[in-house]
Amino acid sequence: MKQLTEEDTIQKPLPIADSDSHAMWEGLKKGELLLQHCEDCGHVQYYQQGLCRICQSKKLVHRAASGRGIIHSYSVVHRSPGPAFRDDVPYAVLLVELEEGPRMISSLLGKDFTHLAIDSPVAMKTMKISEQVFLPCFELVNLADK
Amino acid sequence: MRNKNTLRGKVAIVGIGQSPSGRVPGRSPLDLTADASLKALADAGMDKSQLDGVLTGNAYASSFHRFSVALSEYLNIQPSYSNTLQVSGATAGAAVNTAAAAICSGLADTVLVACGDSLLTGMTPDLAIRAMTESRDQQYEMPFGIPVANTFAMTAHRHMKEFGTTSEQMAQVAVTFRQHASRTPGAQKTDLISIDDVLASKMVSSPYRKLDCSLISDGAAALILTSAEKAYEYNQEPIFILGGGEYYSHEHIFLMPNLTETGAVQSAQKAYQMAGVSPLDIDVAGIYDCFTGTVLMMLEDLGFCKKGEAGPFVEAGEITYGGCIPTNTHGGMLSYAHPGIPAAWFHFTEVVRQLRGNCGERQVKDAEVGLVHTLGAGFSTHATTVLGKGSTL
Ligand SMILES: [Zn+2]
Protein backbone atom coordinates (compact mmCIF):
# COMPACT_ATOMS: atom_id res chain seq x y z
CA MET A 1 0.00 0.00 0.00
CA LYS A 2 1.08 3.59 -0.60
CA GLN A 3 2.87 4.75 2.52
CA LEU A 4 1.63 8.15 3.61
CA THR A 5 3.92 10.51 5.50
CA GLU A 6 3.04 13.00 8.25
CA GLU A 7 3.53 15.65 5.56
CA ASP A 8 0.68 14.14 3.55
CA THR A 9 -1.69 14.47 6.49
CA ILE A 10 -1.04 18.23 6.75
CA GLN A 11 -1.94 18.88 3.11
CA LYS A 12 -5.59 19.13 2.17
CA PRO A 13 -6.49 16.68 -0.58
CA LEU A 14 -7.09 18.72 -3.73
CA PRO A 15 -8.84 17.50 -6.84
CA ILE A 16 -6.55 16.68 -9.75
CA ALA A 17 -8.57 17.08 -12.94
CA ASP A 18 -8.37 14.30 -15.49
CA SER A 19 -9.47 14.19 -19.12
CA ASP A 20 -13.03 13.31 -18.05
CA SER A 21 -13.38 16.11 -15.53
CA HIS A 22 -11.23 18.94 -16.92
CA ALA A 23 -14.22 20.96 -18.19
CA MET A 24 -16.01 20.84 -14.85
CA TRP A 25 -13.08 22.18 -12.85
CA GLU A 26 -12.58 24.90 -15.50
CA GLY A 27 -16.26 25.80 -15.24
CA LEU A 28 -16.02 26.23 -11.49
CA LYS A 29 -13.31 28.86 -12.00
CA LYS A 30 -16.03 30.90 -13.76
CA GLY A 31 -18.54 30.20 -11.02
CA GLU A 32 -20.44 27.53 -12.97
CA LEU A 33 -21.15 23.95 -11.94
CA LEU A 34 -21.31 22.07 -15.23
CA LEU A 35 -23.51 18.98 -15.45
CA GLN A 36 -23.43 16.55 -18.34
CA HIS A 37 -26.69 16.23 -20.29
CA CYS A 38 -27.08 13.21 -22.58
CA GLU A 39 -28.44 14.19 -25.98
CA ASP A 40 -29.63 10.63 -26.63
CA CYS A 41 -31.54 9.73 -23.45
CA GLY A 42 -31.84 13.00 -21.55
CA HIS A 43 -29.99 11.75 -18.48
CA VAL A 44 -28.26 14.45 -16.44
CA GLN A 45 -25.15 13.35 -14.62
CA TYR A 46 -22.62 14.37 -12.01
CA TYR A 47 -19.69 13.48 -12.03
CA GLN A 48 -18.08 13.95 -15.44
CA GLN A 49 -17.58 10.79 -17.47
CA GLY A 50 -16.61 9.98 -21.04
CA LEU A 51 -20.00 8.40 -21.60
CA CYS A 52 -23.58 8.51 -20.34
CA ARG A 53 -24.01 6.25 -17.31
CA ILE A 54 -27.51 5.22 -18.46
CA CYS A 55 -27.21 4.63 -22.21
CA GLN A 56 -23.42 4.77 -22.77
CA SER A 57 -23.86 7.44 -25.44
CA LYS A 58 -20.91 9.76 -25.93
CA LYS A 59 -23.16 12.64 -26.98
CA LEU A 60 -22.86 14.62 -23.77
CA VAL A 61 -23.18 18.37 -23.53
CA HIS A 62 -22.23 20.51 -20.59
CA ARG A 63 -24.80 22.86 -19.12
CA ALA A 64 -24.42 24.98 -16.01
CA ALA A 65 -26.54 23.87 -13.07
CA SER A 66 -28.97 26.33 -11.54
CA GLY A 67 -27.07 25.95 -8.28
CA ARG A 68 -30.31 25.27 -6.40
CA GLY A 69 -30.83 22.07 -4.48
CA ILE A 70 -31.97 20.52 -1.24
CA ILE A 71 -30.04 18.71 1.48
CA HIS A 72 -30.58 14.97 1.00
CA SER A 73 -28.43 14.22 4.03
CA TYR A 74 -25.54 15.71 5.98
CA SER A 75 -23.11 15.13 8.80
CA VAL A 76 -21.33 17.69 10.94
CA VAL A 77 -17.70 16.74 11.37
CA HIS A 78 -16.39 17.44 14.86
CA ARG A 79 -13.33 15.20 14.79
CA SER A 80 -11.19 16.19 11.83
CA PRO A 81 -9.88 13.51 9.48
CA GLY A 82 -6.27 14.44 10.27
CA PRO A 83 -4.39 17.75 10.71
CA ALA A 84 -5.37 19.15 7.29
CA PHE A 85 -8.92 19.85 8.45
CA ARG A 86 -8.19 20.49 12.14
CA ASP A 87 -8.67 24.26 11.93
CA ASP A 88 -11.96 23.81 10.07
CA VAL A 89 -13.94 21.75 12.60
CA PRO A 90 -16.80 21.76 13.16
CA TYR A 91 -17.91 21.79 9.52
CA ALA A 92 -20.86 20.25 7.74
CA VAL A 93 -20.46 17.84 4.84
CA LEU A 94 -23.58 17.87 2.68
CA LEU A 95 -25.13 15.38 0.31
CA VAL A 96 -26.99 17.82 -1.92
CA GLU A 97 -29.69 16.82 -4.38
CA LEU A 98 -29.52 19.31 -7.23
CA GLU A 99 -32.65 20.68 -8.87
CA GLU A 100 -31.56 18.90 -12.09
CA GLY A 101 -31.57 15.51 -10.33
CA PRO A 102 -28.01 14.43 -9.55
CA ARG A 103 -26.65 14.34 -6.03
CA MET A 104 -23.20 15.54 -5.00
CA ILE A 105 -20.95 15.76 -1.97
CA SER A 106 -20.17 19.29 -0.89
CA SER A 107 -19.73 21.39 2.20
CA LEU A 108 -21.78 24.03 3.94
CA LEU A 109 -20.39 27.55 3.98
CA GLY A 110 -20.28 28.88 7.50
CA LYS A 111 -20.76 27.31 10.87
CA ASP A 112 -24.36 28.11 11.70
CA PHE A 113 -25.93 24.68 11.93
CA THR A 114 -29.18 25.73 13.60
CA HIS A 115 -31.24 25.46 10.40
CA LEU A 116 -29.26 22.56 8.93
CA ALA A 117 -31.68 19.71 8.24
CA ILE A 118 -32.64 17.15 5.64
CA ASP A 119 -34.76 18.81 2.90
CA SER A 120 -33.44 22.33 3.66
CA PRO A 121 -32.97 24.33 0.44
CA VAL A 122 -29.43 25.35 -0.45
CA ALA A 123 -27.70 27.43 -3.12
CA MET A 124 -24.23 26.95 -4.61
CA LYS A 125 -21.30 29.33 -4.24
CA THR A 126 -17.80 28.58 -5.40
CA MET A 127 -14.97 28.82 -2.92
CA LYS A 128 -11.48 29.70 -4.14
CA ILE A 129 -8.86 27.32 -2.77
CA SER A 130 -6.05 28.29 -5.17
CA GLU A 131 -5.71 29.83 -8.65
CA GLN A 132 -6.41 26.38 -10.09
CA VAL A 133 -9.01 25.04 -7.69
CA PHE A 134 -12.47 26.38 -6.93
CA LEU A 135 -14.73 24.07 -4.94
CA PRO A 136 -18.53 24.02 -5.26
CA CYS A 137 -19.98 24.76 -1.82
CA PHE A 138 -23.48 25.55 -0.62
CA GLU A 139 -25.20 27.93 1.73
CA LEU A 140 -28.59 27.54 3.32
CA VAL A 141 -31.30 29.55 1.59
CA ASN A 142 -33.09 31.73 4.06
CA LEU A 143 -36.72 31.10 3.17
CA ALA A 144 -37.75 34.38 4.80
CA ASP A 145 -35.68 36.27 2.20
CA LYS A 146 -37.56 34.78 -0.70
CA MET B 1 -32.66 -27.80 -4.53
CA ARG B 2 -29.01 -28.76 -4.75
CA ASN B 3 -27.42 -27.32 -7.85
CA LYS B 4 -23.98 -28.58 -8.80
CA ASN B 5 -22.95 -25.08 -9.75
CA THR B 6 -23.05 -23.73 -6.22
CA LEU B 7 -20.65 -23.72 -3.30
CA ARG B 8 -23.11 -25.40 -0.96
CA GLY B 9 -21.38 -28.01 1.17
CA LYS B 10 -18.35 -28.33 -1.08
CA VAL B 11 -15.85 -26.37 0.99
CA ALA B 12 -15.22 -26.15 4.73
CA ILE B 13 -13.32 -23.97 7.15
CA VAL B 14 -11.03 -26.42 8.95
CA GLY B 15 -8.69 -24.07 10.80
CA ILE B 16 -8.93 -20.67 12.49
CA GLY B 17 -6.26 -18.56 14.14
CA GLN B 18 -5.84 -15.10 15.65
CA SER B 19 -2.84 -13.08 16.67
CA PRO B 20 -3.10 -11.03 19.85
CA SER B 21 -5.26 -8.00 19.04
CA GLY B 22 -6.03 -4.61 20.52
CA ARG B 23 -2.80 -2.76 21.40
CA VAL B 24 0.05 -4.97 20.15
CA PRO B 25 3.14 -2.78 19.79
CA GLY B 26 6.33 -3.81 18.05
CA ARG B 27 4.83 -6.25 15.59
CA SER B 28 4.53 -5.66 11.85
CA PRO B 29 1.39 -6.49 9.85
CA LEU B 30 3.24 -9.44 8.25
CA ASP B 31 4.42 -10.70 11.64
CA LEU B 32 0.89 -10.52 13.05
CA THR B 33 -0.60 -12.21 9.98
CA ALA B 34 2.02 -14.98 10.01
CA ASP B 35 1.25 -15.53 13.71
CA ALA B 36 -2.48 -15.91 13.00
CA SER B 37 -1.74 -18.17 10.00
CA LEU B 38 0.49 -20.53 12.00
CA LYS B 39 -2.18 -20.69 14.70
CA ALA B 40 -4.79 -21.60 12.09
CA LEU B 41 -2.51 -24.37 10.79
CA ALA B 42 -1.97 -25.65 14.33
CA ASP B 43 -5.73 -25.49 14.98
CA ALA B 44 -6.35 -27.65 11.92
CA GLY B 45 -3.38 -29.91 12.66
CA MET B 46 -2.08 -29.18 9.18
CA ASP B 47 1.43 -28.68 7.83
CA LYS B 48 1.97 -25.53 5.75
CA SER B 49 3.13 -27.74 2.85
CA GLN B 50 -0.54 -28.59 2.33
CA LEU B 51 -1.45 -24.99 1.51
CA ASP B 52 -1.52 -24.25 -2.21
CA GLY B 53 -3.54 -21.05 -2.06
CA VAL B 54 -3.13 -17.76 -0.19
CA LEU B 55 -5.64 -14.89 -0.22
CA THR B 56 -5.29 -11.73 1.87
CA GLY B 57 -6.41 -8.14 2.05
CA ASN B 58 -3.96 -5.25 2.13
CA ALA B 59 -2.42 -3.65 5.21
CA TYR B 60 -2.24 0.13 5.66
CA ALA B 61 0.84 -0.11 7.88
CA SER B 62 2.75 -2.25 5.39
CA SER B 63 4.40 -1.07 2.19
CA PHE B 64 3.77 -4.31 0.30
CA HIS B 65 1.40 -3.98 -2.65
CA ARG B 66 0.99 -7.75 -2.94
CA PHE B 67 0.41 -8.64 0.69
CA SER B 68 -0.62 -12.22 -0.14
CA VAL B 69 2.64 -12.79 -2.02
CA ALA B 70 4.69 -11.13 0.72
CA LEU B 71 2.96 -13.27 3.36
CA SER B 72 3.69 -16.43 1.37
CA GLU B 73 7.38 -15.55 1.21
CA TYR B 74 7.40 -14.64 4.94
CA LEU B 75 6.08 -18.14 5.70
CA ASN B 76 8.17 -19.75 2.95
CA ILE B 77 5.11 -20.97 1.04
CA GLN B 78 5.02 -21.06 -2.77
CA PRO B 79 1.29 -21.14 -3.61
CA SER B 80 -0.11 -21.88 -7.04
CA TYR B 81 -3.08 -19.60 -6.32
CA SER B 82 -2.82 -16.17 -4.70
CA ASN B 83 -4.42 -12.73 -4.66
CA THR B 84 -4.60 -9.60 -2.56
CA LEU B 85 -8.19 -8.46 -2.57
CA GLN B 86 -9.47 -4.93 -2.03
CA VAL B 87 -13.17 -4.26 -1.62
CA SER B 88 -12.73 -2.37 1.66
CA GLY B 89 -14.62 -3.81 4.62
CA ALA B 90 -16.20 -6.51 2.47
CA THR B 91 -12.79 -8.01 1.71
CA ALA B 92 -13.15 -10.72 4.38
CA GLY B 93 -16.39 -12.12 2.99
CA ALA B 94 -15.25 -11.68 -0.59
CA ALA B 95 -12.00 -13.54 0.19
CA VAL B 96 -13.85 -16.46 1.79
CA ASN B 97 -16.29 -16.66 -1.13
CA THR B 98 -13.43 -16.42 -3.62
CA ALA B 99 -11.34 -19.06 -1.85
CA ALA B 100 -14.34 -21.39 -1.81
CA ALA B 101 -14.89 -20.81 -5.52
CA ALA B 102 -11.23 -21.52 -6.25
CA ILE B 103 -11.43 -24.80 -4.34
CA CYS B 104 -14.67 -25.81 -6.11
CA SER B 105 -13.15 -25.08 -9.49
CA GLY B 106 -9.89 -26.93 -8.88
CA LEU B 107 -7.70 -23.83 -8.96
CA ALA B 108 -6.62 -24.67 -5.41
CA ASP B 109 -7.05 -27.46 -2.89
CA THR B 110 -6.43 -25.74 0.42
CA VAL B 111 -6.42 -21.97 0.84
CA LEU B 112 -5.13 -19.76 3.64
CA VAL B 113 -7.35 -16.66 3.91
CA ALA B 114 -5.58 -14.23 6.22
CA CYS B 115 -5.29 -10.54 7.01
CA GLY B 116 -3.49 -8.40 9.57
CA ASP B 117 -2.61 -4.78 10.20
CA SER B 118 -1.27 -2.53 12.92
CA LEU B 119 -3.46 0.55 12.64
CA LEU B 120 -3.08 1.41 16.32
CA THR B 121 0.65 1.19 17.02
CA GLY B 122 2.11 0.84 13.52
CA MET B 123 0.87 4.29 12.49
CA THR B 124 0.14 7.60 14.17
CA PRO B 125 -3.60 8.30 14.68
CA ASP B 126 -3.38 11.06 12.05
CA LEU B 127 -1.86 8.68 9.51
CA ALA B 128 -4.36 5.92 10.26
CA ILE B 129 -7.35 8.24 9.84
CA ARG B 130 -5.91 9.82 6.70
CA ALA B 131 -5.04 6.42 5.20
CA MET B 132 -8.64 5.31 5.60
CA THR B 133 -9.94 8.65 4.27
CA GLU B 134 -7.80 8.16 1.15
CA SER B 135 -10.28 5.49 0.08
CA ARG B 136 -12.77 8.22 -0.87
CA ASP B 137 -12.59 9.79 -4.33
CA GLN B 138 -9.81 12.34 -4.73
CA GLN B 139 -11.88 14.66 -6.93
CA TYR B 140 -15.47 14.50 -5.82
CA GLU B 141 -15.35 13.51 -2.15
CA MET B 142 -12.00 14.00 -0.40
CA PRO B 143 -11.61 17.77 -1.00
CA PHE B 144 -14.69 18.36 1.17
CA GLY B 145 -13.04 16.80 4.21
CA ILE B 146 -15.15 13.65 4.21
CA PRO B 147 -13.93 11.19 6.84
CA VAL B 148 -14.85 7.51 6.72
CA ALA B 149 -17.49 8.04 9.40
CA ASN B 150 -19.17 10.70 7.29
CA THR B 151 -20.60 8.49 4.56
CA PHE B 152 -22.09 6.09 7.09
CA ALA B 153 -23.26 9.02 9.23
CA MET B 154 -25.25 10.44 6.32
CA THR B 155 -27.05 7.13 5.86
CA ALA B 156 -27.84 7.13 9.59
CA HIS B 157 -29.35 10.63 9.40
CA ARG B 158 -31.63 9.47 6.60
CA HIS B 159 -32.64 6.41 8.61
CA MET B 160 -33.52 8.63 11.57
CA LYS B 161 -35.52 10.97 9.34
CA GLU B 162 -37.39 8.26 7.42
CA PHE B 163 -38.09 5.77 10.21
CA GLY B 164 -37.78 7.73 13.45
CA THR B 165 -34.72 5.78 14.54
CA THR B 166 -33.15 7.37 17.62
CA SER B 167 -29.64 7.92 18.94
CA GLU B 168 -30.63 5.80 21.94
CA GLN B 169 -31.52 2.86 19.69
CA MET B 170 -28.17 3.13 17.88
CA ALA B 171 -26.39 3.38 21.25
CA GLN B 172 -28.01 0.10 22.30
CA VAL B 173 -25.91 -1.68 19.66
CA ALA B 174 -22.70 -0.42 21.31
CA VAL B 175 -24.00 -1.34 24.76
CA THR B 176 -24.92 -4.88 23.67
CA PHE B 177 -21.64 -5.58 21.88
CA ARG B 178 -19.72 -4.28 24.90
CA GLN B 179 -21.60 -6.80 27.06
CA HIS B 180 -20.55 -9.50 24.59
CA ALA B 181 -16.91 -8.34 24.62
CA SER B 182 -16.84 -8.41 28.42
CA ARG B 183 -17.04 -12.20 28.16
CA THR B 184 -14.51 -12.58 25.33
CA PRO B 185 -10.87 -13.23 26.23
CA GLY B 186 -8.60 -10.79 24.41
CA ALA B 187 -11.24 -8.14 23.71
CA GLN B 188 -9.86 -4.60 23.55
CA LYS B 189 -12.72 -3.00 25.50
CA THR B 190 -14.42 -4.94 28.27
CA ASP B 191 -15.71 -2.27 30.68
CA LEU B 192 -19.51 -2.18 30.49
CA ILE B 193 -21.14 0.97 29.12
CA SER B 194 -24.65 2.41 29.25
CA ILE B 195 -26.74 4.22 26.68
CA ASP B 196 -26.03 7.42 28.62
CA ASP B 197 -22.28 6.78 28.29
CA VAL B 198 -22.66 6.53 24.51
CA LEU B 199 -24.77 9.69 24.35
CA ALA B 200 -22.28 11.55 26.56
CA SER B 201 -19.25 10.60 24.46
CA LYS B 202 -17.79 13.22 22.12
CA MET B 203 -19.45 13.90 18.78
CA VAL B 204 -17.28 12.61 15.91
CA SER B 205 -19.43 13.07 12.80
CA SER B 206 -23.10 13.66 13.58
CA PRO B 207 -25.11 11.65 14.52
CA TYR B 208 -22.17 9.40 15.49
CA ARG B 209 -20.39 9.92 18.78
CA LYS B 210 -17.15 8.28 19.82
CA LEU B 211 -18.85 5.19 21.28
CA ASP B 212 -20.94 4.76 18.11
CA CYS B 213 -17.66 4.30 16.20
CA SER B 214 -15.51 1.19 15.95
CA LEU B 215 -12.11 1.01 17.64
CA ILE B 216 -8.66 1.35 16.11
CA SER B 217 -6.54 -1.74 16.77
CA ASP B 218 -3.68 -3.99 15.81
CA GLY B 219 -4.28 -7.62 15.01
CA ALA B 220 -4.65 -10.43 12.50
CA ALA B 221 -6.81 -13.46 11.91
CA ALA B 222 -6.64 -16.40 9.54
CA LEU B 223 -8.90 -19.12 8.16
CA ILE B 224 -8.01 -22.30 6.33
CA LEU B 225 -10.46 -23.62 3.73
CA THR B 226 -10.35 -26.98 2.03
CA SER B 227 -12.64 -29.26 0.03
CA ALA B 228 -15.43 -31.25 1.69
CA GLU B 229 -13.62 -34.45 0.67
CA LYS B 230 -10.56 -33.54 2.76
CA ALA B 231 -12.37 -31.64 5.50
CA TYR B 232 -12.59 -34.53 7.94
CA GLU B 233 -8.85 -35.31 7.77
CA TYR B 234 -8.03 -32.53 10.24
CA ASN B 235 -8.32 -31.90 13.97
CA GLN B 236 -11.45 -29.80 14.11
CA GLU B 237 -15.08 -30.23 13.24
CA PRO B 238 -15.35 -28.74 9.73
CA ILE B 239 -17.70 -25.80 9.29
CA PHE B 240 -19.10 -25.77 5.77
CA ILE B 241 -19.76 -22.90 3.38
CA LEU B 242 -23.47 -23.18 2.61
CA GLY B 243 -23.82 -20.09 0.46
CA GLY B 244 -22.13 -16.91 -0.66
CA GLY B 245 -23.29 -13.72 -2.29
CA GLU B 246 -21.88 -10.28 -3.03
CA TYR B 247 -23.15 -6.97 -4.39
CA TYR B 248 -21.49 -3.75 -5.47
CA SER B 249 -24.07 -1.03 -6.05
CA HIS B 250 -21.99 2.14 -6.41
CA GLU B 251 -18.60 3.72 -5.76
CA HIS B 252 -19.42 7.31 -4.80
CA ILE B 253 -21.74 7.89 -1.85
CA PHE B 254 -23.68 10.40 -3.96
CA LEU B 255 -24.56 7.62 -6.40
CA MET B 256 -25.90 5.28 -3.72
CA PRO B 257 -29.40 4.61 -5.08
CA ASN B 258 -31.15 4.73 -1.69
CA LEU B 259 -29.35 5.75 1.49
CA THR B 260 -31.47 3.49 3.70
CA GLU B 261 -31.48 0.31 1.66
CA THR B 262 -28.20 -1.27 0.68
CA GLY B 263 -26.72 -3.95 -1.54
CA ALA B 264 -26.83 -6.28 1.46
CA VAL B 265 -30.38 -7.09 0.31
CA GLN B 266 -29.06 -8.59 -2.92
CA SER B 267 -25.89 -10.19 -1.50
CA ALA B 268 -27.86 -11.87 1.31
CA GLN B 269 -30.61 -13.04 -1.02
CA LYS B 270 -28.06 -14.78 -3.19
CA ALA B 271 -26.33 -16.37 -0.20
CA TYR B 272 -29.62 -17.54 1.35
CA GLN B 273 -30.78 -18.99 -1.93
CA MET B 274 -27.54 -20.91 -2.45
CA ALA B 275 -27.63 -22.16 1.13
CA GLY B 276 -31.32 -23.08 0.92
CA VAL B 277 -32.06 -21.19 4.12
CA SER B 278 -34.02 -18.12 5.21
CA PRO B 279 -33.09 -15.53 7.86
CA LEU B 280 -35.22 -17.52 10.33
CA ASP B 281 -32.77 -20.44 10.03
CA ILE B 282 -29.75 -18.40 11.12
CA ASP B 283 -28.75 -19.11 14.73
CA VAL B 284 -25.84 -16.69 15.11
CA ALA B 285 -24.53 -13.76 13.07
CA GLY B 286 -21.38 -11.75 12.56
CA ILE B 287 -22.32 -8.36 11.14
CA TYR B 288 -19.76 -5.74 10.13
CA ASP B 289 -20.16 -3.06 12.78
CA CYS B 290 -18.04 -0.09 11.77
CA PHE B 291 -20.75 2.13 13.31
CA THR B 292 -23.78 1.39 15.47
CA GLY B 293 -26.32 2.50 12.86
CA THR B 294 -24.64 0.29 10.28
CA VAL B 295 -25.78 -2.74 12.26
CA LEU B 296 -29.38 -1.47 12.37
CA MET B 297 -29.53 -1.12 8.61
CA MET B 298 -27.96 -4.55 8.10
CA LEU B 299 -30.44 -6.26 10.44
CA GLU B 300 -33.14 -4.95 8.10
CA ASP B 301 -31.40 -5.65 4.80
CA LEU B 302 -30.30 -9.16 5.86
CA GLY B 303 -33.95 -9.89 6.63
CA PHE B 304 -33.80 -10.27 10.41
CA CYS B 305 -36.45 -7.57 10.82
CA LYS B 306 -38.56 -5.35 8.57
CA LYS B 307 -37.26 -2.15 6.97
CA GLY B 308 -37.36 0.68 9.48
CA GLU B 309 -37.88 -1.58 12.49
CA ALA B 310 -34.30 -2.29 13.54
CA GLY B 311 -34.32 0.35 16.27
CA PRO B 312 -37.14 -1.27 18.30
CA PHE B 313 -35.74 -4.73 17.37
CA VAL B 314 -32.40 -3.92 19.02
CA GLU B 315 -34.10 -2.25 22.01
CA ALA B 316 -36.08 -5.44 22.55
CA GLY B 317 -32.86 -7.44 23.00
CA GLU B 318 -33.15 -9.35 19.73
CA ILE B 319 -29.40 -9.20 18.91
CA THR B 320 -28.20 -10.81 22.10
CA TYR B 321 -28.64 -14.15 23.87
CA GLY B 322 -32.25 -15.24 23.97
CA GLY B 323 -33.16 -12.86 21.14
CA CYS B 324 -33.92 -13.57 17.47
CA ILE B 325 -30.34 -13.33 16.27
CA PRO B 326 -27.39 -13.17 18.69
CA THR B 327 -24.92 -10.97 16.81
CA ASN B 328 -21.19 -10.30 17.22
CA THR B 329 -20.89 -12.47 20.29
CA HIS B 330 -17.17 -11.60 20.45
CA GLY B 331 -17.92 -7.88 20.72
CA GLY B 332 -17.35 -6.87 17.10
CA MET B 333 -15.35 -3.92 15.84
CA LEU B 334 -17.08 -1.70 18.37
CA SER B 335 -15.52 -3.57 21.31
CA TYR B 336 -13.39 -6.59 20.33
CA ALA B 337 -10.97 -5.15 17.74
CA HIS B 338 -10.86 -3.12 14.54
CA PRO B 339 -7.47 -3.40 12.85
CA GLY B 340 -8.92 -2.09 9.53
CA ILE B 341 -9.45 -4.56 6.71
CA PRO B 342 -8.72 -7.59 9.00
CA ALA B 343 -11.56 -6.59 11.37
CA ALA B 344 -14.18 -8.73 9.67
CA TRP B 345 -11.93 -11.80 9.81
CA PHE B 346 -12.76 -11.86 13.52
CA HIS B 347 -16.47 -12.11 12.70
CA PHE B 348 -15.61 -15.29 10.79
CA THR B 349 -13.44 -16.81 13.52
CA GLU B 350 -16.18 -16.13 16.10
CA VAL B 351 -19.02 -17.60 14.03
CA VAL B 352 -16.89 -20.69 13.30
CA ARG B 353 -16.20 -21.09 17.04
CA GLN B 354 -19.93 -20.72 17.76
CA LEU B 355 -20.81 -23.39 15.20
CA ARG B 356 -18.11 -25.71 16.58
CA GLY B 357 -19.70 -25.17 20.00
CA ASN B 358 -16.41 -23.91 21.48
CA CYS B 359 -17.54 -20.60 22.95
CA GLY B 360 -17.86 -21.56 26.59
CA GLU B 361 -19.94 -19.09 28.55
CA ARG B 362 -20.72 -17.05 25.44
CA GLN B 363 -21.94 -20.08 23.46
CA VAL B 364 -25.21 -19.64 21.59
CA LYS B 365 -27.07 -22.84 22.44
CA ASP B 366 -27.40 -25.37 19.62
CA ALA B 367 -26.00 -23.02 16.96
CA GLU B 368 -25.98 -24.91 13.66
CA VAL B 369 -26.24 -22.24 10.95
CA GLY B 370 -24.38 -18.93 11.03
CA LEU B 371 -24.12 -15.86 8.82
CA VAL B 372 -21.29 -13.40 8.31
CA HIS B 373 -21.98 -10.14 6.50
CA THR B 374 -19.08 -7.85 5.69
CA LEU B 375 -19.38 -4.47 3.97
CA GLY B 376 -17.38 -1.37 3.24
CA ALA B 377 -16.81 2.00 1.62
CA GLY B 378 -20.04 3.70 2.66
CA PHE B 379 -22.17 0.62 1.87
CA SER B 380 -20.61 0.28 -1.60
CA THR B 381 -19.35 -3.27 -1.11
CA HIS B 382 -21.18 -6.24 0.39
CA ALA B 383 -20.30 -9.90 0.90
CA THR B 384 -22.50 -12.42 2.70
CA THR B 385 -21.48 -15.94 3.67
CA VAL B 386 -23.74 -18.59 5.21
CA LEU B 387 -21.91 -21.25 7.24
CA GLY B 388 -23.18 -24.49 8.75
CA LYS B 389 -22.25 -27.60 10.68
CA GLY B 390 -21.91 -30.88 8.78
CA SER B 391 -25.32 -31.86 10.17
CA THR B 392 -26.93 -29.11 8.05
CA LEU B 393 -25.84 -30.62 4.73
ZN1 LIG C 1 -27.81 8.61 -22.17
Image (tube, coloured by chain):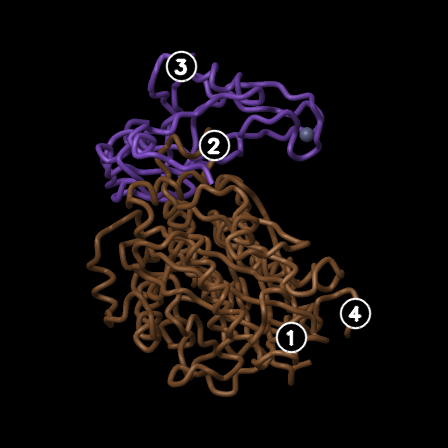
Chain colours: A purple, B brown
Q: Which chain is indicated by disc 4?
A: B
**Where is mark 4, residue-wise?**
B3
Spatial CA span between label 3 and label 1: 56 Å
- Dot 4: within a 10 Å radius of its alpha carbon, few (fewer than 14), some, or many (20 or more) residues? few
User: Which amino acid type is marked by label 3?
Assistant: Gln
Please give the name of the residue rendered at 61% of the width and 50% of the height, measured from the top-left corner: B83
- Reading the image, the residue beneath label 1 is B277
- Sort mark 3 into few (<14), some (14-19) or many (20+) by Cα contacts within 10 Å: some
Front residue (pair B147, B181): B181
Label 2 amino acid?
Leu
- Type of the residue with mark 1: Val
- What kind of element bears circle 2? strand
Q: Nearer the viewer, residue B156 or B388?
A: B388
Q: Residues within 10 Å of mark 2 (few under 14, many from 20)?
A: many
Q: For the N terminus of chain B, which image quadrant?
A: bottom right
Q: Is mark 3 within 8 Å of ligand 1?
A: no
Query: Disc 1 sits on a residue from what chain?
Result: B
Residue occupying the far bottom of the picture: B366
Q: Position of residue B252 (x, y in %)?
A: 51, 39
Q: Which residue is mark 3?
A: A132
Quadrant of the image where one finds ligand 1? top right
Q: Which residue is mark 2?
A: A98
- How far, Cα to Cα, is label 4 from label 1? 14 Å
